[in-house]
Image: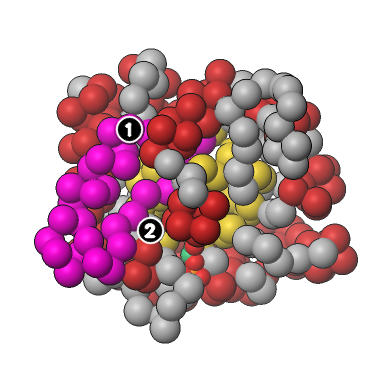
Amino acid sequence: MRRRTWIGTGWKMNFLLADAEGYLAELGAFLRGAGDGLPAVFVVPPFTILRSVCQRARTLPLLVGAQNMHWEARGAYTGEISPAMVKDCGAALVELGHSERRAMYGETDAAVNRKVLAALGCGLVPLVCVGDTAEEQRLGVAAESVARQVKIALHGVPRDRVGDVVVAYEPVWAIGQDGTPASPEWASALHAVVREAIAALHGAEAADRCAVLYGGSVTPANAGALLAAPDVDGLFVGRAAWAPQGLVALVRIAMEARGRRAP
Ligand SMILES: O=C(CO)COP(=O)(O)O
């Protein structure tokens, strides 16, 4: 099955409103003139500028996501943001289970699962991040760890909604480190693990509809090879896309790669 290509960036704890305005002015000029064949392009700003970015993106072929949310609709959860609040800002996506949240804020697989179900219930696309640590890779349990994360995160998703979920495979050892991404072969193998885990839960046909993106030290120099790897449906990028020219370069590479791929 030919799935949509996704290219996006998480801004993490960066960007004030003025930074975002400059970024979107430059990205917007490119997107408006890009013509047919654009992938699904997305940015994931911090909460403080989410509504403003959504408003500015409304007239662009650009999706906007939140970096996290709570699973409950409302209540005494000081400091938290509900799914409806994310939706109310105009966001289409919500990033869930990023390894920084798992490692630094104790986010568990079970919490990610509740958030995935809440996101779907609210009409948001859950962008579910999973990945193996360096230790898991060294001990030969990377595939098991990733499969477990996927099976818990997507537990209970209605079969007809699996295609509304996007998974990002992001090896923890490749994120924000010295710039070494997974090899295309490793990424391809682990993306197959992700898809098999979804198939084990929801069947092969549903798994086939779910886009699986790669993230971790992606740059314009390595993006082409990663996008050409079987089962890699797109890229989720940090540092290399924190300047608009970086994201534009990656979108261009994706458009070229897509043109080359057999239908
Ligand atoms: O965390 C990431 C995307 O979620 C990737 O970060 P880097 O591209 O900076 O390694």
Give x and y (percent) for residue 105: 54, 52
Tell me if mark 2 has few (under 14), some (14-19) or many (20+) residues whose alpha carbon lies within 10 angstroms of its own. many
Q: Which residue is mark 2?
A: 170
Q: Amino acid at mark 2?
A: Glu
Q: In which quadrant is the N terminus drawn?
A: top left
The outermost residue toward the left is 140
User: Residue most toward the bottom?
Assistant: 178
Residue at image coords 54%, 66% = 238
Residue 152 is labelled as 1
Position of 39 relative to 209 (above/below): below
Residue interval drawn in magenta: 126-153
Marks 2 and 1: which is nearer the front? 1
Residue at the (71%, 32%) spot, across then down: 77
- Quadrant of the rendered structure where residue 128 is? top left
Q: Given contact means CB atoms under 8 Å apart, are the residues at marks 2 and 1 in contact?
A: no
Measuring 81% from the left and 68% from the top, which residue is drawn there?
Answer: 19
Q: Say what secondary structure mark 2 lies in.
A: loop
| Dominant secondary structure, magenta | helix
Residue 103 is one of the magenta-drawn residues: no
Residue 57 shown left or right of residue 185 in the figure = right
Please, is residue 203 above or below residue 148 in the view? above
Q: CA distance from mark 2 to mark 1?
A: 17 Å
Residue 72's spot in the image, x, y percent? 62, 24
Is residue 13 visible in the rendered image? The answer is yes
The amino acid type, in three-letter code, at marker 1 is Ile
Q: Is mark 2 within 8 Å of ligand 1?
A: yes
